Amino acid sequence: MIKKSLLSLGLLLGFVAVIHAQDEFDALKASQTQLKGTARYMGMGGAFTALGGDASAISLNPAGLGVYRSSELTATLNMMNNSSNSTWKGVTNSDNNIFAHFNNLSIVATIPGTDQYSSALSFTFDRLKSFNRNGVVSGANQLSSLTDNIAYRTGGIPESALQSSNDPFNNTSIPWISVLGYEGYLINPSSSGTNQWTTLLGTTETVRPSYSYSERGYIDQYSIGYAGNISNIVYLGASIGWQSLNYSLISNYGETFGSGGSMNLRNEIYTTGSGFDVKLGVIVRPVDFLRLGFAYHTPMFYNMTDNYYASLNYDTERKGTISTPDEGGYSKYKVQTPSYYTFGLAAVLGKKGILSFDYQYQDFTTMKLKNQDGDSQSFEFENEGVKANMKSVSSFKVGGEFRATDNIALRLGYNYISPATKPDAYRVLANNSVRTDSEYFLDVNTQNFTAGIGFRYNNWNFDLAYVLSNQKQDFYPYDDINLAPARLTTHNSNLAFTIGLRY
């Protein structure tokens, strides 16, 4: 049974609306970032809103650029070991992979001034997010089946419209999943009503489900920043950033039927996008040991392009494979991410250390999907889904640095990030959607545990950081009130190395 009555409305609207393949889960994918940056920034848990003098702190609070007293070049290499563990009805699985990328490349140029005012300019590259992960999820026998979901979504469609002679993939009133289900013999016309459909499975027949996925891609940011230092008391900064998003997902959802036979649905999604934002920040030093910081990031305004491909391998009444058209599904749209607010408090303990605390806030119910002309009304139903399924997120960061000697610094940090999705959120694909991937992940929480060490020699600095990120999510292969979710835990172990030169 489908979870919400709202789904029925969504399916009805799908027949009369312009075809859209995007929803709130796609907007969320483009809106969330990770703890990435220089090794010093990562080692202190990214708690840098009230601090400066670090290349990655500029992307958090551009006022931190004003703290620089000399120019600097930095580069950071990151090695990531991704491990995903799942538990679904007592069945456990795991998978892991190793990836490498640059976190940060930056140039900071200080501009000479007076005792009352000086400034600095920066050009930076930052990797804000790595999508790279693989995973396997499998469960015990269950009554719920994707074929039930397909039959429900096909309700109201006459059999003649699904027949290949009528070119159903080009019929904008029919979801592609219904075409695959019909041609793969997963659904049958119902004898109880006109244009109604039933699953091929018996009433008490169980299925054994499995799911595997491979995600790849990144969100990169290129920015120009400027900040001024007023009497070493007030620091004001601003930056303009351009972001590039590249994402791909290849997934396989399969079921083995209790009475014999099976099906496997393979989905491929490729997304590219670019956008821009503006960041404004301030740091105040009311007394020597205290720093107060605040920064505001405007929404990111993305232009996105999606391509969708799917194939169904079936072993039912017959065996075979049916695929969507070679050109796949294609769409262009815009995403507006939430504004971002960050507040920071830091204590500078003489020359021996730093303690820093950050609080960050984003309201993910303010995300918007728009058409290419920037009109959000054409995505009215999807944007209502944003408000219904998303929530505001609070992030807490704490970090510390202790100078063991004049040349060696030790660092620790911790983050807690609350979930962006409501616990009863669900995915609704319009009933004329070219998408056939009905699965979705709901956030539970994310924690980062960090540690680092830094060494300075003359004008050079060498920093090393380790970050263990634990993200918990609930996985649903499709929307069904009787379907228990799988618990997925993703562990990302990041080892970052930064080399920097001040001149």
Image (cartoon, rainbow, N blue to C red):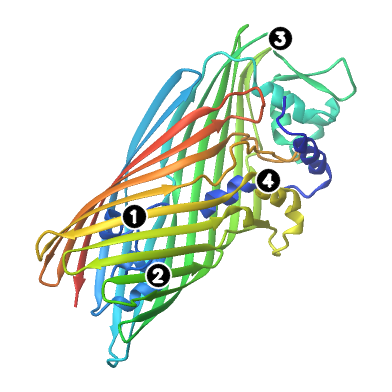
432 or 95, which lies in front?
Answer: 95
Q: Position of residue 145 (x, y in %)?
A: 65, 20
Q: Residues within 10 Å of mark 3 (few under 14, many from 20)?
A: few
Circles 4 and 3 in contact, beta carbons < 8 Å: no
- Closer to the N terminus: mark 4 or mark 3? 3
User: Callout 4, which amino acid?
Assistant: Ala
Q: Which residue is mark 2?
A: 293
Instruction: Name which residue lies at 31% across and 67% down.
Output: 55
Q: Nearer the viewer, mark 4 or mark 2?
A: 2
Q: Which residue is mark 4?
A: 388
Mark sitting on residue 202: 3
User: Callout 3, which amino acid?
Assistant: Gly
Height in image: 330 above or below 334?
Answer: above
User: Callout 1, which amino acid?
Assistant: Val
Q: What element does badge 1 sit on? A: strand
Instruction: Name which residue lies at 53% across and 53% down.
Output: 30
Circles 3 and 2 in contact, beta carbons < 8 Å: no
On the image, which quarter does residue 36 sit in? bottom left
- The outermost residue toward the right is 194
Q: What element does badge 2 sit on? A: strand
Q: Whole-Å distance between the Cαs marked 1 and 4? A: 31 Å
Q: Position of residue 448 (x, y in %)?
A: 35, 46
Residue 374 located left or right of residue 412: right
Q: Residues within 10 Å of mark 2 (few under 14, many from 20)?
A: many
- Closer to the N terminus: mark 1 or mark 4? 4
Q: Which residue is mark 1?
A: 398
Residue 462 located left or right of residue 479: left
Q: Nearer the viewer, mark 3 or mark 1?
A: 1
- The outermost residue toward the front is 287
